[in-house]
Image (cartoon, rainbow, N blue to C red):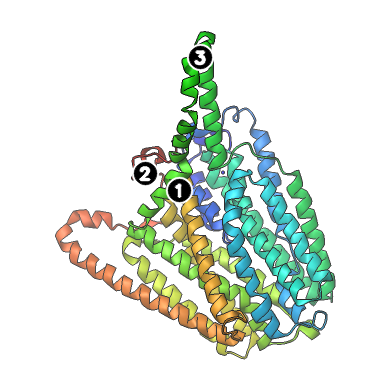
Amino acid sequence: MVEDDATASGDRSEDENELDMKVLASENTDGHVEDGDVEMAVSASEPPSVSEGLPGEAGQPRKWKWAVIFLCFYGFMSSIKPGEPFITPYLLSPEKNFTRKQVTNEITPVLTYSYMAVLVPAFLLTDLLRYKPVLIVQGISQVSIWLILLLGTSLLEMQMMEFFYGITMACRVAYSSYIFSLVSPVLYQRVAGYSRTSVLLGVFTSSVLGQLCMSLGNISFYNLNAISLGFVSFGLLLAVCLPWPKRSLFFNQMRNQEQKELAASGATKSELDKMKPKESGESSAAPVCSASRWKDSVFVQMLLEVRNVIRRPNLRLWSIWWVFNSTGYYLVLFYVHILWYNVYPAAENKNVYNGGVEAASTLLSAMASFTAGFVKIRWNVWSELVIGIITALQAGLLLLMRTTGNIWVCYTAYVLFRAFYQFLVPIATFQIASSLTKELCALVFGINTFLGTILKSIISLIFSDKRGLALDVHSQFLVYFIYFIILTVAYFVGAAVVIIRHCRNQPSAGGGAKDQATPTELSLVAVNSEAEPLSNGKNARA
């Protein structure tokens, strides 16, 4: 998925590489974004090989630079939706006049179902159609969201709004991967930092702008949503103007390779060879060869390789964290605005500070992600314990949010809850991605995200949906608290097993064990992916 002048980039100093790593670790996503972590993962898994640059790219440094700048500008502008933190108060306000039960049990659950249904098609179509059409679909979905919020009045229309919101979330993977199609692999880490920073700045600016409009401008929810419609319409226009990449990670890369092979073989054939009658007999075997090429393709081979990933303890642990903890995290994000309204129902007086809280949580989460880049411990020994402690703290914050009657305590607990999660995101990203090729890495993170989405849908169907238990929001947060407690116990049990095993093996291992358990920083592991064959003997870059 992006590229620079390979020769010039290869001469970067070690200080610059370290700085790029810290910039990447500081990146974060807003409360609804999961796919941005895949972007970080791909950049982490790509070794700094100068030999993989695109031909002719070194002679056009300005072209790709302007393309990256334009894409980052698009990412910034498409993230500015000042009305987004105030959607729930708007639905519960007299302007829309929906009940809390309708918003909690009938409208919000549609988002999870829609996201699950669209995620896999969006992931595949993003690569097959080379990003731009999916970004246009995302822009159309965002325009639809704000048009429905402005003009819709019925329950069904609000459910359609959440359906389009799920499409928007699923299509964000296109932006995360688009930028890697613009530059050479040696620049993946740097441009990933640029693109994620632009989104982070957009989310922060959007939240601050929305809060200023509400607190100082005395703007109504309707007018704030109209402003958001203007911004997303401009974002759609920018998506239409984006350049169309010539390659992608899986399908188009294989197609280009096959076309080159066919062209090369055709050029070597003489006219006499083409006129031989036995060629017609060989042509009948072409479909068989094509099927064989499909079975040996990168995408199919990596699907077969995924089952071997779970055999690696480190990858298995962090993938489990990604699936289960991200599920609880996003369920909290989906329903926390309803909880705030229950604690402090001040929507009629416009004394709502959702935008300011989202801005503060985004900023603190970015700082937490940046801090994670400086953590230096023995992750092979202490990973389970660190995850267990942070999960326990998150469980305590959830209990505090559920029981407190003070809105500012609830706000603070939410900000800290997000920061703890985002602290572990870059650690999990690099622990998983550093030993995988970029193609396999993207597939693993896609599978983890999809499994997490399925789990979210199951929990929503059982506890939130009106067809299930239809719990109120306070009861749902009690369920989330119990969920995090169960995860905490599981992580602490795993930590005890790992630490006891480490202590038993340390004396007998001698100096070798000591060397293997040296503290490691969260940094890029330059793995030569060309030398990393798949377990079935195939190479992921073949």
Numbered circle sitting on residue 211: none
Q: Is residue 143 above or below residue 177?
A: below
Query: Which residue carries the number 1 mark?
Result: 440
Given the image, on which type of amino acid does mark 3 rest?
Lys
Give the left or right position of residue 541, taking residue 342 as reference.
left
Decide: is 258 above or below 467. Answer: above
Under circle 1, the secondary element is helix
Residue drawn at x 64%, y 69% as measured from the top left: 111
Q: Secondary structure at mark 2?
A: loop
Distance between the alpha carbons at the discs numbered 3 and 1: 36 Å
Q: Which mark is residue 534?
A: 2
Which image quadrant for residue 515? bottom left
How far is disc 1 from disc 2 in space, using C-alphas?
A: 10 Å
Q: Which residue is mark 3?
A: 269
Residue 488, above or below 68: below
Q: Secondary structure at mark 3?
A: loop
Looking at numbered disc 1 in the image, what kind of residue is underneath it?
A: Leu
User: Mark 2 and mark 1 in contact (Cβ < 8 Å)?
Assistant: yes
